[in-house]
Image (cartoon, rainbow, N blue to C red):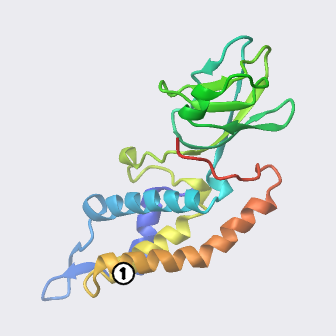
Amino acid sequence: MSTIANIITAIRAELDDNITDSGGNTITPRWDDSLHLLPMVKRCITRTSDILYRHNIAFAMKRTTFATVANTPTYDVLPVDYGVDGGLYRTDTYKRLDKIDFDQWEQLNLISQMSVWMIDEDEDIAIKGTPTSVVTMALWYWPEIAVSAYTTGTTMPWSGRVDEIIIEYMVNRLRANDEYDITQFDNMLMSEIQQNRLNKWRRWNYMNPGVVPFVRPRRF
């Protein structure tokens, strides 16, 4: 899989960004890897992550499992890269637990076993209808992409599926830097790229039978 350094190399191959002296000799590239290109790639990865979530693209999700314990309602099991949940499922009955908010949680009294859940104030998974036995649970979620720790040696996320879109975006943005209002161009470019690629990404959801059907989670 490619690294950010590979992405930067591909971007430079599309750009003529060398600054030359009066004799035509190259002095230095206009765009420095650490000062310009790396931060821009990191911002682009963050924006792409938001797009993948907003449009329910399943390949950006992860799955983790944990086991319940009899008479234990809360579980400190959220992955370190947890961002937003997609769904919590019982693997024995193949049923999805309904996610509720704190207000609903506090007002529920009589309820069937292991029917609803929430993320509590301690960022634990809390299950109402306390489990009475060991059940393997499956949590699907969108990870938080921690770009602050990324370097040029970091492997690109999503198994390279979005490398091309990031290169395309970066090249066009850098070329337009001196000619357009960047904010306006940036929004226009991202909108166009989204429309060109989202149909392909959505199709991926239905071509992979292991992907859980999506229901948009609430952000709480």
- Near mark 1 (Cα within 10 A), the count class, few <14, some 14-19 or many ≥20, is some
State the residue position of label 1. 185
Q: Residue furthest top?
A: 71
Where, by quadrant of the figure, is residue 133 drawn?
Answer: top right
Task: Work out whether residue 151 or residue 180 is closer to the camera in this orientation and state it.
Answer: 180
Left or right of 102, for residue 181: left
Task: Work out whether residue 116 or residue 19 is closer to the camera in this orientation and state it.
Answer: 116
| Residue 23 pos. (x, y %) | 15, 88
Image: 144 above or below 160: above
Where, by quadrant of the figure, is residue 172 drawn?
Answer: bottom left
Left or right of 179, for residue 57: right
| Residue 94 pos. (x, y %) | 84, 37
* Residue at horizontal 42 percent and vertical 59 percent from the top: 5
Amino acid type at circle 1 is Phe
Task: Work out whether residue 80 or residue 86 is closer to the camera in this orientation and state it.
Answer: 86
* Residue at horizontal 56 percent and vertical 64 percent from the top: 162
Q: Residue furthest right?
A: 93
